[in-house]
Image (tube, rainbow, N blue to C red):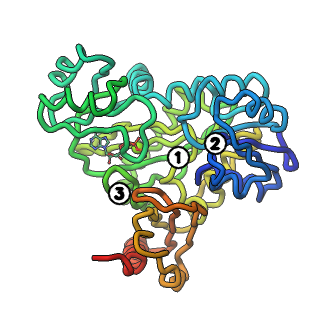
Amino acid sequence: MILPGETLGVLGGGQLGRMFCEAARTLGYKTIVLDPDPDSPAGDVADRHLCANYEDEFALQEMSNRCAAITIEFENVPATSMRYLSQRCQVSPSPEALQICRNRIREKHFLCDHDLPTAPFAVVTNENQLEPAIRKIGVPALLKTATGGYDGKGQTFITEEAQIESAFCELGRTPCVLERHLELSLELSVVVVRTADGASCCYPVAENQHISGILDTSIVPARIPSSLARQASHLATRVADSLNFNGVLAIELFVVNEMLLINEIAPRPHNSGHYTLNATVSSQFEQQVRMLCALPPGDTALLSPAVMCNLLGDLWESAIPPWENMLQQPTAKLHLYGKRKARRGRKMGHFTVLEQDIERALRISQEIKQSLASSLPP
Ligand SMILES: Nc1ncnc2c1ncn2[C@@H]1O[C@H](COP(=O)(O)OP(=O)(O)OP(=O)(O)O)[C@@H](O)[C@H]1O
Ligand SMILES: [Mg+2]
């Protein structure tokens, strides 16, 4: 066990890294962040910020010398860096799990190999595979880059077969997955916590609403039959078991014709799990600390129904949003990530509304969103 007083490291200095550092600090750990951005949100709250690239050998060596254990905040860190660190100190997730989850092609093959359901897909790595792929999958379809995509980036929507050539070109002729674009009745996610000896527990299922490929709102508990919620948790546990995962993992699910399909695996805490900062006994970030330090998991029980909404840079378009409007609502909890520059589509913060009645929580969250957008041009 790695106990409070020790130093923990995180690769990636965005909001997920920041919330990891805050949880670690609350428990009495020291933290070091590696991120090339001098203005990183996590760097601001960590004891130390190593401002260097993720491949920088000196920085990686310094991390492994100083830290008892190291984790990540996003899967686009080079698997080679994680392997280097894993030879020198405790890491989570394992380089093997990261290698699978950071690449859509490997992720899809992994899911198929373990009889885990996905949307129909075909792999495209060169021009010759375009025609057979679109013939197999049909339209409408989505072409997604195998690596580097997030928040709907690295994806092109295809409505006619002939568009596949230009879509592949637009994405830089890099390896891709072609997926059938499905009629979704709902999107769900499950965060699961798994110890090194294979014990696991799931958080309640979140119901997620996206706008333009970016998560907008998470509603917890999801408004679905309990049998579907059980199936979702069961799938999350099967994914974690199949990866022999140790740490915090999230799966994103599509509901299509009352069937569950796995969209993506995130080998880390997830945006749709931010409600756990306020609405459950232990947050997903506390669990990340606990799993990294070989401590027992905390309780995942829900203390109150919750609605979480992301705050995107769009809200900053004409001025700083009028926070005084939302701070008047006593059941809303505001989290801002301290990012210095707001950009369209950039996640700047989120808020969570806690109410016993979930529909009331939704109504209040909509009112808050409207009040924050009130200073924007129509
Ligand atoms: N095959 C599909 N059919 C219908 N909608 C889809 C499909 N794939 C993706 N989407 C929509 O686009 C959203 C983003 O897709 P996906 O999760 O693959 O992208 P991402 O950029 O990796 O996002 P994230 O920020 O979650 O990592 C999904 O949550 C869903 O709303
Ligand atoms: Mg996704």
Mark number for residue 368? none
In the image, residue 125 lies at what x, y percent?
33, 18
C-alpha separation, residue under disc 1 versus residue under disc 2: 28 Å
* Residue 68 seen in this snapshot: yes
**Disc 2 designates what residue?**
36
In the image, residue 16 lies at what x, y percent?
59, 51
**On-image quarter of the C terminus:** bottom left
- Indicate if the residue with disc 2 has its beta carbon within 8 Å of ligand 1: no
In the image, residue 19 lies at what x, y percent?
64, 55
Q: Residues within 10 Å of mark 3 (few under 14, many from 20)?
A: some
Lower position in the chain sequence, tag 1 or tag 3: 1
**Disc 1 designates what residue?**
191
> Which residue is at 59% across, 58% downward?
301
In terms of secondary structure, where does tag 2 sit?
Answer: loop
Q: 105 above or below 41?
A: above
Query: Quick one: 40 or 137, which is closer to the camera?
Result: 40
Q: In which quarter of the view is residue 304 placed?
A: bottom right
**Disc 3 designates what residue?**
209
> Which residue is at 50% across, 26% downward?
100
C-alpha separation, residue under disc 2 versus residue under disc 3: 32 Å
Lower position in the chain sequence, tag 2 or tag 3: 2
The picture quadrant for ligand 2 comes to top left
Nearer the observer: mark 1 or 3; the answer is 3
Q: In which quarter of the view is residue 281 placed?
A: bottom right
Q: Amino acid at mark 3?
A: Gln
